[in-house]
Image (tube, rainbow, N blue to C red):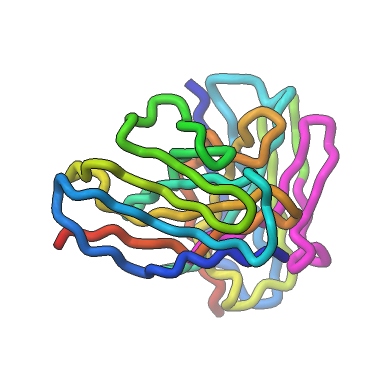
Amino acid sequence: EIVLTQSLATLSLSPGERATLSCRASQSVSSYLAWYQQKPGQAPRLLIYDASNRATGIPARFSGSGSGTDFTLTISNLEPEDFAVYYCQQRSNWPWTFGQGTKVEIK
Amino acid sequence: QVQLQESGPGLVKPSETLSLTCTVSGGSISDYYWSWIRQPPGKGLEWIGYIYYSGDTNYNPSLKSRVTILIDTSKNQFSLRLSSVTAADTAVYYCARRLGTSGWIDYWGQGALVTVSS
């Protein structure tokens, strides 16, 4: 099973700042990586798929990069609604797995 | 707009079988893959398995011996059965739709909390 490690459990930032979240895979997942946003009491929402493609309706301030084992989600200018938990997910090998999440909180 | 809604008991006794149904509205269940994903309280997400509208399934090896996912295209529903549950199976259970043939989820149900307790 591929383990995804999100090294930061919590990231404390202010609105308007740039958020950089990382996700490392225990083995190469090529570009088969996605990012989801989850707010309290809600289901996750797909932000980025195939490492760098924005899902439908996702604002341009969200961007993804990386391939192989190291990936990054960047939120260029944090809006109040962006404070949430972010998960990475791989679909390279079954079972598809998620990282443990990074919470972006208001500083 | 596709909508998914989980339904089923919120409390299950240890050693019994957890059963949930997902009803899909706003679109056909055909031509898509449908998944169950769970999230223990305060923890991360775990993929339980998925089913194609044809009935083909794939289960997480860690749960394979206890999981059954079925589909009823006539009712636009699919279901989850998890046997021999323990407290470790307490979680919010989400039904979800995969984006095309990819492994990404584009539609989620709101989630159903299932507690395993006597």
Relative to residue A79, is residue B44 drawn left or right?
A: right
Relative to residue A33, is residue B29 drawn left or right?
A: right
Give the position of the C terminus of chain A as an image quadrant.
bottom left
Q: Please give the range of residues in magenta.
A: B44-69
Relative to residue B13, is residue A54 drawn left or right?
A: left
Residue A54 percent location from the top left of the image? 46, 32
Residue A15 percent location from the top left of the image? 14, 48
Residue drawn at x 38%, y 62% as measured from the top left: A102
Q: Is residue B54 inside the magenta stretch?
A: yes
Asked if A48 appears above or below A37 in the picture, the reply is: above
Asked if A94 appears above or below B72 in the picture, the reply is: below
Closer to us: A1 or B58: A1
Give the position of the N terminus of chain A as an image quadrant.
bottom right
Residue drawn at x 59%, y 68% as measured from the top left: B12
Closer to us: B85 or B60: B60
Q: Splitting the image into 4 quarters, where does residue A57 fall?
A: top left
Residue drawn at x 50%, y 59% as measured from the top left: A23
Residue A12 percent location from the top left of the image? 22, 63
